Image (cartoon, rainbow, N blue to C red):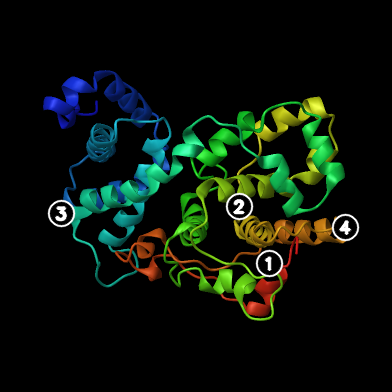
Amino acid sequence: MINECKCEGAIRSDLDEQVDVILKDLERMPSDQHKIYIKNAKLVTPHLSEEEAIEHRCNELMEILCIFNYEYGEYLQGYHELVSLFLLVLEMDVFGSSCSSSLLDRKYILHDTYSIIERVLPQLDEVYSGNDLDVESRLRFVSGDDKFRRHLMAMDANSGLYCARWTRLLFSREIEDWKSWLLLMDIFMDLTSQSPSILSLRDISLYSRPGVTPILIPGKMDWMTILETAAASLIWMHREELMAVDPFDELPLLLSLKPLTSVSCLTATLLSSLRRIQHEEIPEATDANFETHMYHIQHGLRHPFRTLSRRFSIGRSSICSHDSFSNEEFANTAAVGS
C-alpha cells in the first residue's frame, strides 16, 4: 500500500479526494516504468523485494503529485504517468546507465523532477481542458488528401473520443516502449521551448537548413498545435486501414491501434507538416506520397535523438544509443509527406 503520510498535514487535510484519485492511478501504473528503479534499488538493498521497491517509487511519485496538486490546485488523471516518465529519465542518469558518472545527485532527484513538471504540465492545460481537438483540419497539412479527410469526417465522432489519450499522455501509450517515447519527447521539447537547444538539430535541421522550402522555424510553438498535428500524423500513418473500412467502423479501429515500434515516421511526418502549417501551405495528395510513407513504416527506419534529461541541461545524451546511418538516408525518411 502506498504510504499516505507523504500527504499529511495541511496538504492532506485539503486534498483528501484528490489524494484518493492519485493513489488509485499510481496503483495502475505500467510496471515497465519501475524496472530501472527496481534493479538499482536491489543493488543497494539486496533483501528488498520487487513489491517494496515499487511501493517506494510510488511514494516518491505521490509526494511530487501531492505537492503539485497543492501548489497549482489541480491533479488531472494522466499526470501520474507523465511524472513517472520524467522521473524515469532522471533515474536513468542517476543510476549510471552507460555513463561513467552522473550529472545528477540522487538526493535532489525529486526536486529536479518537480522542476520539470512545473515547466511542462501547466502548458498542457488546454490539452486537458476537454475542448475539441482540431485534428481534421490538421490533416490538410499532413497530406492534402481531401478524400481521406472526408472519409474520416463521415465517422461523425468528435476527435476527442479517440485522441484524448494520445494527446494527454503525450503519445506515451502509442509508442511500444518508453525509450522510443523519449526520442519523440526531445522533438516536442525543442519545438515548444522559448530557446531551442541543439538536441534535435540533426532532425529539425532537415527542415530548417538553407535551401529547404518552406523552412521550419523551431521553438515557441504551442503544445496544442504540435499534439493535434502529431495526432493527424498518426491517423495518416493508418490511412490504408481506415480507408478500407466503413466510416462507422473507424472509431473502434482508432481506439485499438497497435503501438508504434519506431517513431521515425511519426516525427518525420510531424515536422514536415508543422513547417507547412507555419507557412499555410497545403500539399497536393499523391499516391506516391503515401507509398513512400508506408515503405518507411514497414522497414522501421529510425533516427537518433538525445534524452529528455539533457533538454533541461541536467542529464547526459549518451543514455540512449544512437542508430548510425547517413543524413542522406534519414532525409529520405523525412521527405515523407513533403
From the image, tell me which residue sits under label 1: 334
Amino acid of disc 4: Thr
How many angstroms separate mark 3 from mark 2 (CA)? Answer: 35 Å
- Would residue 172 appear left or right of 26 to someone viewing this image? right
How many angstroms separate mark 1 from mark 2 (CA)? Answer: 17 Å
Q: Are marks 2 and 4 in contact (CB under 8 Å)?
A: no
Q: Quadrant of the N terminus?
A: top left
Any mark on residue 241, and which?
Answer: none
Q: Earlier in the sequence, mark 4 or mark 3?
A: 3
The residue at the point 48 percent across, 59 percent down is: 220
Depth check, mark 2 against mark 4: the one in front is 4
Q: Earlier in the sequence, mark 4 or mark 1?
A: 4
From the image, tell me which residue sits under label 2: 261
From the image, tell me which residue sits under label 3: 107
Which quarter of the figure has residue 108?
A: bottom left
Q: Position of residue 206 (x, y in %)?
A: 63, 73
- Would residue 326 appear left or right of 321 to someone viewing this image? right
